[in-house]
């Protein structure tokens, strides 16, 4: 049996439980896998052709687009080389979730960035657990100070 990269890549993208989203240089969604459908609740036809505002909370959009446009103009991002970024995101029903993601920039022959792919994972449960643990630690520390 031989390894077929041409078959492997699309099957991997579709089978991944994580969201894989590709946007062009204008921030328009051009690829939206089944993981993105599951995590965000938008069908492929609802998402493709829309901007990332679809999943970015309104209060974070200006900051996002400032960074996105700077990345497109300079070809550099603070979040490259496997750095993981954690941000809030929106589901189709309007609920906020916590996602972690990495990005990969795509360039043309001249090195100009033509788009960005992101692999996103819903970490809402882990974020809530961490917040609860921090709350418990703070309570224990306050109790320890009160007992001293």
Image (cartoon, rainbow, N blue to C red):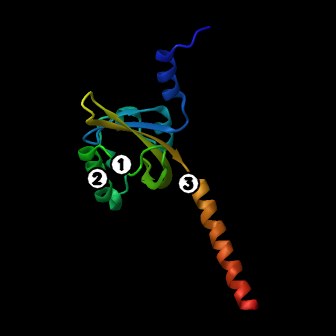
Q: Is residue 62 above or below residue 1?
A: below
Label 2: which secondary element: helix
Foreground residue, 95 or 133?
133
Label 1 to label 3: alpha-carbon separation: 25 Å
Tell me if mark 3 has few (under 14), some (14-19) or many (20+) residues whose alpha carbon lies within 10 angstroms of its own. some
Label 3: which secondary element: helix
Q: Earlier in the sequence, mark 2 or mark 3?
A: 2
Q: Earlier in the sequence, mark 1 or mark 2?
A: 2
| Quarter of image, res 59 | bottom left
Tell me if mark 1 has few (under 14), some (14-19) or many (20+) residues whose alpha carbon lies within 10 angstroms of its own. some
Where does residue 18 sit, x and y in percent of width and height? 52, 38
Q: Which residue is mark 1?
A: 77
Label 1: which secondary element: loop
Could you tell me which residue is drawn at 35 percent across and 47 percent down?
A: 54
Label 1 to label 2: alpha-carbon separation: 13 Å
Foreground residue, 120 or 44?
120
> Are the residues at dot 2 and dot 3 in contact (C-beta closer than 8 Å)?
no
Instruction: Name the quarter where the C terminus is drawn.
Output: bottom right
| Quarter of image, res 3 | top right
Task: Specify the farthest residue to the front.
Answer: 110
Could you tell me which residue is drawn at 43 percent across and 52 percent down?
A: 89
Q: Nearer the viewer, mark 2 or mark 3?
A: 2
Q: Which residue is mark 3?
A: 124
Instruction: Name the quarter where the N terminus is drawn.
Output: top right
Label 2 to label 3: alpha-carbon separation: 23 Å
In the shown orientation, is residue 54 left or right of residue 144? Answer: left
Q: Which residue is mark 2?
A: 65
Task: Specify the farthest residue to the right.
Answer: 147
Where does residue 38 sit, x and y in percent of width and height? 51, 39
| Quarter of image, res 125 | bottom right
Foreground residue, 137 or 38?
137
């Amino acid at each position: 049996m031989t390894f077929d990269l041409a078959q492997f890549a699309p099957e991997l993208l579709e089978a991944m439980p994580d969201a894989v989203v590709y946007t062009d240089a204008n921030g328009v969604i051009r690829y939206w896998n089944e993981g993105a459908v599951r995590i965000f609740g938008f069908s492929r036809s609802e998402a493709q052709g829309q901007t990332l505002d679809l999943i970015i909370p309104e209060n974070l959009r200006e900051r996002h687009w400032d960074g996105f446009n700077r990345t497109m103009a300079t070809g550099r991002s603070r979040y490259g080389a496997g750095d993981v970024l954690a941000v809030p995101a929106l589901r189709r029903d309007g609920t906020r979730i916590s996602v972690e993601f990495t990005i990969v920039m795509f360039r043309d022959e001249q090195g100009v960035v033509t788009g960005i792919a992101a692999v996103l994972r819903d970490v809402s449960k882990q974020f809530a657990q961490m917040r609860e643990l921090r709350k418990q630690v703070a309570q224990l520390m306050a109790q320890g100070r009160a007992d001293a």
